[in-house]
Structure formats: C-alpha cells, structure tokens
Image (tube, helix red, strand yellow):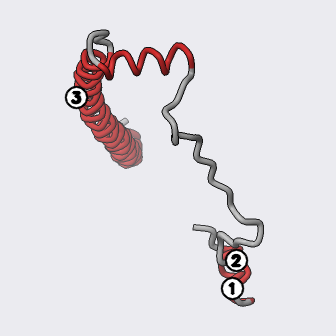
Amino acid sequence: MQDLHQRRGYRYRLMRALVGTGGLVLLALIALVMARGAWHMYGKFSQAAAAREAGEARLADLTEEQDRVRGVVNEPGTSRGVEAEVRERYGLARPGEGEIVVVRQNGEDTGAAGELGFWERLWSAFFVW
C-alpha cells in the first residue's frame, strides 16, 4: 500500500504543481487584461471629463456673448436695433452691400497629383497616410 502512494504521490504532486502553475499564469493574464482595460477606461473617462468641462466653458462663453449681442441689437431705441429689425423683417441691405460669390476657375489644380512621378504615385498608392 505504501508503494502505491509513493508512485501515485510523485505523479500526483507533479500534475498538481503543473496545474497550479498554469492556473496562476491564467489568473495573472486575466488580471493583466482587466488592469489594462481599467487603465484605458480611466483614460477615456478623463478625456471625456476634460472635453465636457471645455464644452461647458465654451457654452457659458457663447451664452454670455449671445446675451450681450441680443441686448445691443434688440434695443428698439438704438439705430443698430432698428436697422437689425428692418433687415431681418424685410430682407433689406444698405446701398453698396451685396452678396459675395466665390468662383473657382476650371483650370485651377488644387492637388499635386499630376506633378508626382511614377515611384511617388506608386508609394502613395500603397501608403495612403
């Protein structure tokens, strides 16, 4: 009976050590993946919080500017207020004011694709960035 336990004990201890080590490695990998995910999530949260603060500050500035402009323009007693009201209601403009139209000429080349050589076009075809 003693011999059976000794032979079984050696193999059993070896398998138990291998399974235990494998389990520890698996747990370490799971912990590493979870820690990495938490780290990236924290980064996203901090970026979102910074963007929200910047957006709220920008909104406060724009609201303040809008209130200031409305106060100046919408006063019916001032000449600017009367002029703005007339322009808005009737679509009028001052003499000499007009619409600006920007026209691009047909022969104008906006890119340098035609000036590239064969190797440069080949390079840019494979490496788009």
User: Which amino acid lies under the numbered mark 3 shown in the image of this protein?
Assistant: Ala
Q: Residue at x 39, y 46 (%)?
A: 22
The x and y percentages for residue 3 are: 37, 44
As drawn, the residue found furthest toward the front would be: 95
Under tag 2, what secondary structure? helix
Left or right, 13 with reference to 96: left
User: Which amino acid lies under the numbered mark 2 shown in the image of this protein?
Assistant: Ala
Mark 1, other Cα within 10 Å: few <14 / some 14–19 / many ≥20: few
- In the rendered image, which quarter contains the C terminus? bottom right
Q: Nearer the viewer, residue 84 or 61?
A: 84
Mark 2, other Cα within 10 Å: few <14 / some 14–19 / many ≥20: few
Q: Earlier in the sequence, mark 1 or mark 3?
A: 3
Q: What residue is shown with label 2?
A: 113
Query: Which labelled disc corresponds to residue 124?
Result: none
Measure the alpha-carbon separation of dots 1 and 3: 46 Å
Q: Nearer the viewer, residue 12 or 18?
A: 18
Q: Earlier in the sequence, mark 2 or mark 3?
A: 3
The x and y percentages for residue 16 are: 37, 41
Q: What residue is shown with label 3?
A: 57
Q: Quadrant of residue 78?
A: top left
Q: What residue is shown with label 1?
A: 116
Is 5 situated above or below 109? above
Marks 1 and 3 in Cβ contact (< 8 Å):
no
Q: Quadrant of residue 47?
A: top left
Q: Is residue 107 visible?
A: yes
Q: Nearer the viewer, residue 118 or 16?
A: 118
Q: Residue at x 29, y 26 (%)?
A: 62
User: Which amino acid lies under the numbered mark 1 shown in the image of this protein?
Assistant: Leu
Marks 1 and 2 in Cβ contact (< 8 Å):
yes
The x and y percentages for residue 106 are: 77, 66
Q: Residue at x 51, y 37 (%)?
A: 95
